[in-house]
């Protein structure tokens, strides 16, 4: 059974999310502060994490930052912080999605399912080779000259989508659709934040991106001469 760690300091909200996840056939584990969230993550090894940002004891962003040093488990931020800056920071730290409170429980469950499907779908495609880059979708692995690069689920999906068609220009909307299956919201800055992370992990200088290229006014493409 799929296990989801729900981290929120408001018991009413965590119970609501837990109940809807239970109805969807998933097992929910609750934590109500940062330190207990990390303990639950390490002891229960959840398949996905839903985390609030305003947590006692340890901010949710710090929780995400620590988890990302240990795991690429899918993470959804559920927070009352609706400012774009908070969204971008959360995504740049490695979160896969961002849901603003107040939220619809059914939509949250739909996003959980979409993200989990994205993880499962990585076992059904091919291996893409573009220059010195190899994207092994079944293994969810990216290597450059044989050296593996660790990406989160969302980052990997973006790389795999573009590497499958090197040279093709993808709009931000098309990349959002590739991530969600359906576009829940046209939050295109999310794509920019993920691409920034991908470039950093590839080792590209900000002004000289080597693999993921910007097509100004349109979107991004994977260099066909990588």
Image (tube, rainbow, N blue to C red):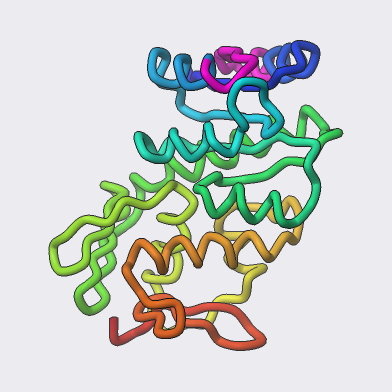
Name the quadrant containing residue 177: bottom right
Seen from the viewer's position, the closer of residues 136 and 216 is 216
- Is 137 placed above or below 32 here? below
- Is 217 placed above or below 31 here? below
Q: Magenta span has 22?
A: yes
Q: Can residue 64 be seen in this snapshot?
A: yes
- Residue 192, x across and y down, in percent: 59, 67
Measuring 50% from the left and 66% from the top, which residue is drawn there?
A: 195
Q: Can residue 6 be seen in this snapshot?
A: no
Residue at the left extreme, as displayed: 146
Residue 84 falls left or right of residue 141: right
Measuring 22% from the left and 61% from the top, which residue is drawn there?
A: 143
Measuring 60% from the left and 14% from the top, which residue is drawn there?
A: 31
- Is 18 placed above or below 114 here? above
- Residue 18, x across and y down, in percent: 68, 15
- Is 223 placed above or below 201 here? below
Residue 56 falls left or right of residue 223: right
Seen from the viewer's position, the closer of residues 104 and 193 is 193
Seen from the viewer's position, the closer of residues 67 and 166 is 67
- Residue 209, x across and y down, in percent: 40, 80
Residue 95 falls left or right of residue 73: right
Measuring 29% from the left and 81% from the top, which residue is drawn there?
A: 226
Name the quadrant containing residue 167: bottom left
Instruction: Please give the range of residues in magenta.
Output: 20-35
Q: Magenta span has 59?
A: no
């Amino acid at each position: 059974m799929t296990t989801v760690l729900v981290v929120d300091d408001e018991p009413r909200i965590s119970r609501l999310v837990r109940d809807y996840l239970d109805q969807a056939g998933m097992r929910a584990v609750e934590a109500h502060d940062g330190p207990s969230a990390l303990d639950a993550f390490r002891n229960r090894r959840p398949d996905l994490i839903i985390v609030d940002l305003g947590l006692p004891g340890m901010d949710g962003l710090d929780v995400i930052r620590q988890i990302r040093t240990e795991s690429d488990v899918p993470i959804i931020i559920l927070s009352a912080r609706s400012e774009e800056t908070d969204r971008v920071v959360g995504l740049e730290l490695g979160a896969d999605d961002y849901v603003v409170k107040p939220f619809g429980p059914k939509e949250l469950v739909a996003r959980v399912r979409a993200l989990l499907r994205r993880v499962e779908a990585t076992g059904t495609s091919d291996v893409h080779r573009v220059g010195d880059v190899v994207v092994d979708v079944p293994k969810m692995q990216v290597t450059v000259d044989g050296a593996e690069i660790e990406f989160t689920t969302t980052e990997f999906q973006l790389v795999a989508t573009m590497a499958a068609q090197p040279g093709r220009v993808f709009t931000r909307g098309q990349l959002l659709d590739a991530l969600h299956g359906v576009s829940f919201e046209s939050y295109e800055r999310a794509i920019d934040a993920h691409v920034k992370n991908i470039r950093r992990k590839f080792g590209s200088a900000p002004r000289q991106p080597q693999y993921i290229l910007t097509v100004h006014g349109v979107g991004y493409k994977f260099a066909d001469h990588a």
